[in-house]
Amino acid sequence: MNPRSLSLAERLEANAILDRLVAEEPTFPDEEARRLIALLPARAPRRFTLNLGLHRPGSTSRGHAAGHGDVELEEPGETTTWSSDSRPILRIGGYEVTHVPGTIEIALIWSETRLDRSGQSCTLVYDIVTGTPQEMRIARQAPIGFFGLQFATVRFVPWKTPRAAGP
């Protein structure tokens, strides 16, 4: 199934809904989640996805500048990411969103530039048949190191539950 394009009005609406869903609260608005589920085009699910990231550290230059004293210039590192899933990603505002029936993955656009991805992405889980939001899960990164190599896994842990609209 190919995802359809969103109009500008739909993108603006989706961006506002995403902002409200990821706000720092213990619950999220049920009706907003339902609207987002209906608004975003879905794509076919994949059984297995492998994401690999390679981080190259930056460099630092030190010296002495006349009239300023000791100075230090730092060049940031670079992270390259590869994924076995060439999924269509919707870029909406500051978010990258992927809708697979049953889940909507939400990530900050700059999340791949961070070494620690904890809190940089979340997933909205919903019932496929009824479209009822069940929960939101947030990313938590767990580093694994051996023989001087550092690996990290990202898992999604429970974060928020839906709240019904007020009277």
Image: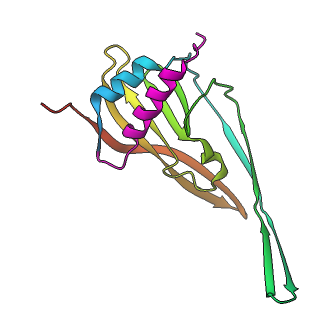
Q: Quadrant of the N terminus?
A: top right
Q: Which residues are magenta?
A: 1-26
- Does 23 appear above or below 39? below
Q: Position of residue 163 (x, y in %)?
A: 23, 35
Q: Position of residue 99 (x, y in %)?
A: 51, 24
User: How is this picture coloured?
Assistant: rainbow
Q: Nearer the viewer, residue 143 or 114?
A: 114
Question: Residue drawn at (48%, 20%), measured in percent from left and top?
Answer: 40
Q: Nearer the viewer, residue 43 or 91?
A: 91
56 on left or right of 140: right
Question: Residue drawn at (51%, 25%), measured in percent from left and top?
Answer: 11
Extreme residue in the left direction:
167
Question: Residue drawn at (63%, 23%), measured in percent from left and top?
Answer: 88
- Does 2 appear above or below 167? above
- Does 67 appear above or below 136? below
Question: Residue drawn at (86%, 85%), measured in percent from left and top?
Answer: 65
| Magenta span includes 15 | yes
| Magenta span includes 80 | no
Residue 159 lies in quadrant: top left
Residue 64 lies in quadrant: bottom right
